[in-house]
Image (spheres, helix red, strand yellow):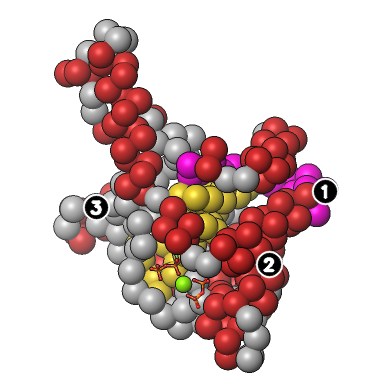
């Protein structure tokens, strides 16, 4: 493990990592348990990823915890996920403070149960001055829903003569997304072997490096994040330029 850490260039860690935490259900099934058992065992992976990212100097970690499409799951599972969210946030608040973690949330948050909204607001408010890392939970999040919401809000401003249509640019669109206070995603990790985006941060991942691992989310540990970051650091991010240009830029 120490060896892996030594292979990481601490000056080149991704600034913003986004993770699609997938595979909880299959992990539980593999153990002959109910799906919810997998969700409960996801918490260690969340804690360990956040701690490791923070130690490495990653400034933003965004976790896909519940999608707009996940509302279509059986009610029992949705209810269990929501109470897990409420209980975890309550329980972890002192730890977020101790570790200087700023909590943030993106998604259609008003569709969450009232008690979840309440605890979320409390945790966000109380951690707002923390500076080590921003940990964002995507909850009832769907990228298309987010874009629809942004278009509505921008259109309202245009109709009310608060915004000139010619002034609409990428920055304005950015400022109307749920991620208005976050930088672009540099690195996206998805666990469980699925190789798709599932309506996550479509706009924000325009130039992200993508990484897929077969590890199921509840098994995801420090060493797996190290492996992912080592892989990221072996890539060349060209942003449309040539390799030669990138070398002279450095
Ligand atoms: C990810 O694990 C967690 C959520 C989507 C809430 P899954 O519950 O999707 O697990 P699999 O994909 O069925 O194994
Ligand atoms: C994506 O996982 C959403 C979260 C991780 C919260 P899913 O397991 O719901 O994705 P699909 O539907 O299989 O693509
Ligand atoms: Mg899944």
Residue at image point 54% right, 59% down: 65
Query: Dots 3 and 1: beta carbons under 8 Å?
Result: no
> On the image, numbered disc 2 is attached to which residue?
43
Q: Residue 239: which disc?
A: 3
Task: Please name the residue that numbered disc 1 is placed on.
Answer: 94
- Residue shown at 34%/74% (left/top)? 195
- Secondary element at tag 1: helix
User: Could you say which is closer to the camera, residue 131 or residue 115?
Assistant: 115
Q: Is residue 143 left or right of residue 104?
A: left
Q: Is residue 180 above or below residue 223?
A: above
Measured in 3D between alpha carbons, the distance from the residue under mark 2 to the one under mark 1, in whole angstroms, is 16 Å
Q: Residue at x 63, y 59 (%)?
A: 79
Which of label 2 and label 1 is nearer to you? 2
Residue 90 percent location from the top left of the image: 78, 49
The first of marks 2 and 3 along the sequence is 2
Q: Is residue 201 visible?
A: yes
In the displayed structure, does residue 92 sit left or right of residue 234?
right
Q: Is residue 102 magenta?
A: yes
Mark 2, secondary structure of its residue? helix
Q: Is residue 30 above or below residue 74?
A: below
Q: Nearer the viewer, residue 248 or 207?
A: 207
Percent of width and height locating residue 104: 59, 42
- Residue 7 location, x and y as percent? 53, 74
Residue 170 image point, x, y percent? 27, 33
């Amino acid at each position: 493990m120490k060896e892996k850490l030594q292979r990481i260039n601490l000056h080149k860690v991704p600034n913003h990592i986004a993770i699609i935490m997938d595979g909880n259900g299959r992990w539980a099934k593999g153990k002959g348990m109910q799906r919810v058992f997998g969700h409960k065992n996801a918490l260690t992976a969340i804690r360990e990823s956040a701690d490791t990212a923070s130690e490495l100097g990653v400034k933003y970690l965004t976790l896909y915890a519940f999608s707009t499409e996940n509302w279509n799951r059986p009610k029992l599972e949705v209810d269990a996920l929501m109470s897990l969210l409420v209980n975890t946030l309550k329980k972890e608040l002192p730890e977020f403070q101790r570790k200087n973690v700023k909590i943030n949330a993106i998604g259609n948050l008003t569709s969450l149960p009232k008690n979840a909204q309440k605890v979320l607001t409390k945790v966000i408010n109380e951690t707002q001055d923390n500076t080590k890392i921003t940990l964002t939970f995507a909850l009832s999040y769907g990228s298309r829903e987010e874009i629809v919401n942004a278009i509505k809000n921008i259109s309202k401003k245009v109709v009310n003569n608060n915004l000139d249509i010619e002034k609409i640019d990428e920055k304005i669109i950015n400022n109307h997304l749920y991620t208005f206070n976050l930088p672009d995603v540099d690195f996206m990790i998805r666990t469980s072997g699925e190789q798709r985006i599932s309506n996550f941060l479509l706009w924000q991942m325009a130039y992200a490096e993508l990484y897929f691992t077969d590890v199921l989310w509840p098994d995801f540990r420090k060493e797996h994040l190290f492996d992912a970051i080592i892989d990221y650091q072996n890539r060349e991010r060209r942003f449309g330029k040539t390799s030669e240009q990138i070398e002279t830029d450095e």
